[in-house]
């Protein structure tokens, strides 16, 4: 099996690195501090056509795979941009997978070209405060009306809702049935009508440059043409997007870990204490070396999972395991790097504390480490379901 990146992927990596050099760590520190969206960065990617990387060519995209997307997002994170840089690009790629795979021809022709050009922004409305990981328990309701639907409910952790014109929205069109808990869920790609929606920003630990929000929906109208695929099958369509998103998240976590190690290694070579560089001390060197090895292993599994997905093969276990290992490895690398700098690691000047805060998210979202272990225990080891 050859799942090494292609010449195209490597060329993309170098081009992304070159672009990211125009957005130094100070740019991201300021945006994290002020909470301002990195519009200049997003525009630079749109101008190069990279927002449409996985959108089919007939809709104005590049038609590339998860491997290329993972390489691109890893390069962004490795540049020092972290999740503040990766997230604006990420949300143009994989939350919209159900639209690419299951949307009507009219829906794809109407919206995918604008998304590929960066002329349109979409929010992702799935998670609810009282449902958590059990998506079958969502309470947002979609009720039939003549020619369409009326939707009411609440979403949380909805990225981009402050600025988005469209929203990919999951709602229940039928009461929950314990025998088929995931039936009766419909996915909509519809206008984010501000007269029917209230958006409240969530202040959070990291990635303040990119908004996360509570969204209160009161009588939002959606047309029948806004339904993605068939009514009642929305959850199944969402599942199509889980594996590729977990794969690219693994790449992102690896990239952040490498950015942190780069800062720490440079500091350890130059910082002299007791008349010797601190990098000569094994108590400093070994944690960084171990972190490097774990990042390499996680990336290798991410490449395998991406290769499987891009070749149409099952990859659920590999995608989940890659996310699990990379989230841990990325955070351990950032933590070891911060420890290497001691008190300076705690200072914003060195940028490590931002990377440390941002990569910590991936031990929680979009699926917790514990839920990944539940999946692997049940579907790989064939142990009884624990929840």
Image: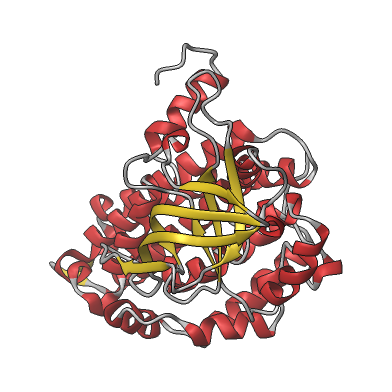
- The extreme right residue here reads 58
Which quadrant holds the N terminus?
top right
Which of the pair 85/177 is nearer the observer?
Answer: 177
Which of the pair 315/227 is nearer the observer?
Answer: 227
Q: Provide residue 187's location: percent of width, then percent of height.
A: 60, 49
Q: Is residue 300 visible?
A: no
Scheme of image coloration: secondary structure
Q: Is residue 90 visible?
A: yes
Which of the pair 88/178 is nearer the observer?
Answer: 178
Q: Which residue is drawn at 71% across and 33% down?
A: 314
Q: Provide residue 309's location: percent of width, then percent of height.
A: 72, 43
Asked if residue 69 lies left or right of residue 364, the reply is: right
Q: Provide residue 149's location: percent of width, then percent of height.
A: 59, 54
Which quadrant holds the C terminus?
top left
Q: In this view, does 209 lie above or below 302?
A: below
In terms of image quadrants, where is residue 24?
bottom left
Asked if residue 154 lies left or right of residue 177, the reply is: left
Q: Residue at x 44, y 64 (%)?
A: 159
Q: Provide residue 191's location: percent of width, then percent of height.
A: 57, 68
- The extreme front residue here reads 146
In terms of image quadrants, where is residue 139?
top left
Q: Residue at x 76, y 63 (%)?
A: 108
Q: In this view, does 382 lie above or below 323?
A: above
Asked if residue 306 lies left or right of residue 252, the reply is: right
């Amino acid at each position: 099996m050859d799942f090494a990146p292609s010449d195209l992927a490597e060329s993309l990596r170098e081009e992304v690195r070159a672009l990211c050099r125009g957005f130094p760590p100070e740019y991201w520190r300021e945006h994290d501090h002020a909470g301002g969206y990195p519009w200049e960065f997003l525009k630079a990617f749109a101008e190069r056509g990279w927002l449409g990387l996985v959108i089919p060519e007939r809709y104005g995209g590049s038609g590339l795979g998860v491997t290329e997307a993972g390489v691109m997002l890893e390069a962004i994170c490795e540049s020092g941009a972290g999740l503040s840089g990766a997230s604006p690009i990420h949300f143009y790629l994989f939350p919209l997978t159900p639209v690419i795979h299951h949307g009507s021809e009219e829906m794809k022709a109407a919206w995918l070209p604008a998304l590929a050009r960066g002329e349109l922004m979409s929010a992702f409305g799935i998670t609810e405060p009282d449902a958590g990981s059990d998506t079958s328990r969502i309470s947002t309701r979609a009720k039939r009306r003549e020619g369409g639907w009326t939707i009411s409910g609440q979403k949380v952790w909805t990225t981009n809702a402050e600025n988005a014109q469209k929203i990919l929205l999951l709602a229940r069109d039928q009461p929950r049935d314990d025998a088929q808990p995931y039936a009766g869920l419909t996915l909509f790609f519809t206008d984010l009508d501000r007269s029917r929606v209230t958006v409240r920003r969530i202040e959070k630990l990291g990635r303040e440059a990119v908004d996360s929000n509570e969204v209160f929906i009161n009588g939002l109208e959606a047309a029948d043409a806004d339904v993605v695929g068939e009514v009642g099958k929305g959850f199944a369509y969402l599942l199509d997007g889980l594996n590729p998103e977990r794969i690219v998240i693994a790449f992102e976590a690896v990239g952040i870990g490498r950015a942190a190690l780069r800062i720490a290694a440079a500091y350890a070579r130059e910082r002299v204490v007791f008349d010797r560089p601190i990098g000569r001390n094994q108590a400093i060197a070994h944690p960084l070396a171990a972190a490097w090895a774990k990042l390499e292993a996680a990336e290798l599994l991410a490449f395998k999972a991406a290769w499987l997905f891009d070749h149409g093969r099952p990859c659920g276990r590999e995608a989940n395991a890659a996310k699990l290992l990379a989230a841990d490895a990325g955070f351990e690398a950032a933590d070891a790097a911060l420890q290497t700098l001691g008190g300076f690691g705690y200072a914003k000047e060195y940028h490590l504390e931002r990377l440390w805060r941002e990569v910590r998210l991936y031990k929680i979202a979009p699926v917790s480490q514990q839920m990944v272990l539940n999946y692997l225990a049940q579907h790989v080891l064939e142990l009884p379901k624990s929840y």
